[in-house]
Amino acid sequence: MAASCRAGGTVGRRDTECILEPLSLPESPGDVAAVQSSPDVPCIFCQECYLLAEQNQLLKHMIIEHKLVIADVKLVADFRRYILYWKKRFAEQPITDFCSVIRTNSEASLEEQDNYFLLCDVLPEDRLLREQLQQKRLREILEQQQRERDDTSFHSVCMFCDQEFTGNRSVLLNHMAREHAFNIGLPDNIVNCYEFLAVLQGKLNNLQCLYCEKVFRDKNTLKDHMRKKQHRRINAKNKEYDKFYIINYLEFGKSWEEVQSEDDRELLDNLEEDWSDWEEHPVCAVCLFCEQQADTTEKLYLHMQKSHGFDFPKIKSEHGLNFYQQVKLLNFIRREIHHFRCYNCQEKFQSKGGLISHMEETKHVTFLPARSTWDQPQYYFPTYENDTLLCTLSDTEDLITEGQSEDIPVISEDISNLKALKQSSILNQLLYKENKS
């Protein structure tokens, strides 16, 4: 609700918060000075004040009462500073010096016509102000992110299993991604992590699905829903989460979706250019046996070989694994490790550390069990929904080895003469050989 900033009574106390003179606003947008902290944002034209959380109410008031429209207000990094700046400037010069005039009902009589004023970044002064506010906000966010990255006093509880984590926030985020298939992004992409986790925990406490935000009658029903519907993730369309991701602060005047689509367009536009300096986007695949991550599969395979004695490229080659067999093998190993069970001797342990120590000491990590144990249809399904390692597997079936014939018959797709196609079909030759034998 609006609060008039007039003297007298309790309103007189708030009146001091709306006085502009002590705020020392800059003369030009090139130097956006600090302003006093206040929960109120004044109208640009009158003494009406609104709480910062009531931004939409203030915008509605300025449109109805003063005919002012602010373009792309959602992209203004600091709404209060922006309003205070223009309140001072409009007091110094006429509004028509800054705003475009939009006339409505232009074909009606003069009494029925209305003039609205559009304040937007087409005006150089407005654009410069927005850029200054954006740069200041970006500096603050990057400083906050760095503090969180360096913080070793982090303490929180997993929202799915109540396990406690201390040290660095990445430990908890990696745990939720690995053990619960809940991935909100890489730790280095997140800011204000405590607040982010509190928001998510609050939704779960209210028995609300994190993706579709539907409310359920009890915790078990909610868990079943999120598992069956694969809703153990957040909805990227929910603007509530934007402030927790660094990408939303990076470029002035653009949302993260626009930045992402622009990057995609650049890739399409530059298809004919030299790709010699192109680098793969890090895959951040996770080790089968520990929490180690690597930005390339080569590094991850080397880590598993040196640290655990598991040489996946060698196993793949020796056993002649095709793509689907590789998928089933990795999902089988992931599942056994998740259950703290040795995939070779089936002995079960109380902790993952105890399991890995056993497997490395007995060399059970090196040898695979019988193919019938893991080459099963159930292992087509990933143990972890976000297992990036599965996306990096390659198929060797199409590679022609020495001594293998390259004379592979290809049947034409032209079936206009079906009778002739049947007579010349390779199947006739196979049937002839079968009957002859």
Image (tube, grey):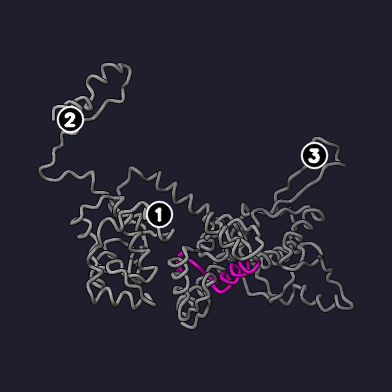
Whether pointer 2 and pointer 3 mark residues with C-beta atoms closer than 8 Å, the reply is: no
Q: Going from the N terminus, do you reach mark 2 or mark 1 first? A: 1
Residue 320 picture location, percent across and down: 21, 52
Whether pointer 2 and pointer 1 mark residues with C-beta atoms closer than 8 Å, the reply is: no
Q: Which residue lies under the disc numbered 1?
A: 381
Q: Which residue lies under the disc numbered 3?
A: 105
In this view, the mark in front (2 or 1): 2
Up/down of 229 relative to 347, above or below: above
For disc 1, the neighbor class at 10 Å (few under 14, some 14 to 19, many from 20) is: few
Q: Which residue lies under the disc numbered 2?
A: 434
Quick one: 229 or 293, which is closer to the camera? Answer: 229
Residue 202 picture location, percent across and down: 63, 69
Farthest residue toward the bottom? 153
As for residue 393 lying within the magenta part, the answer is: no
Q: Main secondary structure of the magenta part?
A: helix
SS for dot 3: loop
SS for dot 1: loop
Q: Going from the N terminus, do you reach mark 3 or mark 1 first? A: 3
Q: Answer whether residue 365 is visible to the viewer in this image.
A: yes
**Three-letter code for the amino acid on which mark 2 is drawn:** Glu
Quick one: 248 or 15, which is closer to the camera? Answer: 248
Magenta stretch in the rendered image:
185-206
**Three-letter code for the amino acid on which mark 3 is drawn:** Asn
SS for dot 2: helix
For residue 195, which quarter of the picture?
Answer: bottom right
Quick one: 212 or 351, which is closer to the camera? Answer: 351
In this view, the mark in front (3 or 1): 1
Tell me the distance, in whole angstroms, between the alpha carbons under discs 3 and 1: 62 Å
Quick one: 329 or 297, which is closer to the camera? Answer: 329
